[in-house]
Amino acid sequence: MRQRFGLGYDSHVFVDSRRFVLAGVEIDHPKGLKGHSDGDAVAHALIDALLGAAAMGDIGGLFPDSDARWKDADSMRLLQDVRRRVVAAGYAIVNVDVTVVLEHPKLAPYLGAMRESLGRALGLPVSAVSVKAKTNEKMDSVGRGKGIQVFAVASLGGA
Ligand code: MG
């Protein structure tokens, strides 16, 4: 089986009066992530990792933020749509790995639910879904709590 890898990255800033949703899981926090969609940066980074592994473009090409259809969109549905596209192209998703960089809040209590949510969306067992969180050691804008960064890697087999 030929193996392929893709890298995804996303960043969003925190704003008042929005739900904070990562990997489809609502996180208890006074701020949420700004974005045309629901701002789910984990879903967005994973979408780019999957599309990158399949060399099928990127999230901005598939779901342009100029398109009203994606306003406040549930990004986990976009992730499921990308899974269908990747599978339709003949690939199988092997595993995914995500690192979220943020200063607050602590994500440890949510990581299990995030892995399960991503596993459901991607048709993967939890053992094939990794989500890690770390701070930026108070450095730069992410370290000052302005927003978050997410890095994601996806591995595909087949085709
Ligand atoms: Mg995004």
Image (spheres, grey):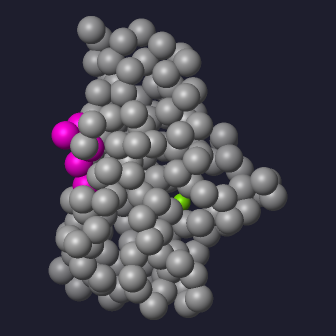
Residue 148 belongs to magenta span: no
**Range of residues picked out in magenta:** 127-131
Tally of marks: 0
Q: Is residue 139 visible?
A: no
Q: Is residue 137 visible?
A: yes
Q: Is residue 68 left or right of residue 131?
A: right
Asked if 22 appears above or below 129 in the picture, the reply is below
User: Residue at the location (38% across, 52% down)?
Assistant: 117
Q: Is residue 101 left or right of residue 78?
A: left
Residue 150: x and y in percent read: 36, 60
Q: Nearer the viewer, residue 72 or 3?
A: 72
User: Residue at the location (58% across, 75% down)?
Assistant: 34
Q: Is residue 155 left or right of residue 132?
A: right
Magenta stretch secondary structure, dominant: strand
Asked if 67 appears above or below 157 in the picture, the reply is below
User: Residue at the location (24% across, 79% down)?
Assistant: 106
Q: Is residue 4 left or right of residue 11?
A: left
Residue 42: x and y in percent read: 41, 57
Residue 86: x and y in percent read: 51, 25
Residue 128 belongs to magenta span: yes
Q: On the rendered image, what quadrant is the C terminus found in?
A: top left
User: Residue at the location (59% across, 66% down)?
Assistant: 38
Residue 62: x and y in percent read: 66, 40
Q: On the rendered image, what quadrant is the N terminus found in?
A: top left
Q: Quadrant of ligand 1?
A: bottom right
